[in-house]
Image: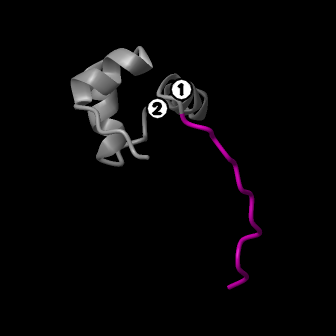
């Protein structure tokens, strides 16, 4: 079941600022490292899976 948090609730649970959650939810990931995203996901009770695929030839 999907949990619904406000940005403030998610930020508190993920141990980050609300602006980080807002940026992440808006797809603005330029200044957020992969490690930080993984930490946020784990703090929110999510499991992270990494999938590596070969780039299509042009």
Q: CA distance from mark 1 to mark 2?
A: 6 Å
Give the prevailing secondary structure in the magenta stretch: loop
Query: What kind of element bears circle 1?
Result: helix
Q: Is residue 43 left or right of residue 4?
A: right
Residue 51 in picture, x, y percent from top left: 71, 56
* Residue furthest bottom as drawn: 58
| Rendered image coloring scheme | one colour
Q: Is residue 31 magenta?
A: no
Q: Which residue is mark 1?
A: 36
Residue 6: x %, y % from top left:
22, 31
Look at the image and tell me whether residue 44 can be seen.
yes
In front of the other: 43 or 36 = 43
Look at 46% across and 32% down and name the residue there.
32
Q: Which residue is located at x 61 percent, y 28 percent?
A: 35
| Residue 16 visible somewhere in the drawing | no
Q: Is residue 45 left or right of residue 29?
A: right
Relative horizontal placement of residue 33, taking residue 18 as reference (left or right): right
Q: Label 2 belongs to which residue?
A: 32
Disc 2 secondary structure class: loop
Q: Which quadrant would residue 14 be assigned to in this image?
A: top left
- Spot occupied by residue 31 in the image (x, y as percentages of width and height): 43, 33
* Label 1 Cα crowd, 10 Å radius (few <14 / some 14-19 / many 20+): few
């Amino acid at each position: 079941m999907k949990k619904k948090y406000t940005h403030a609730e998610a930020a508190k649970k993920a141990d980050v600022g609300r602006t980080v959650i807002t940026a992440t939810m808006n797809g603005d990931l330029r200044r957020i490292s992969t490690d930080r995203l993984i930490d946020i996901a784990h703090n929110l009770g999510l499991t992270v899976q990494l999938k590596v695929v070969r780039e299509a030839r042009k």
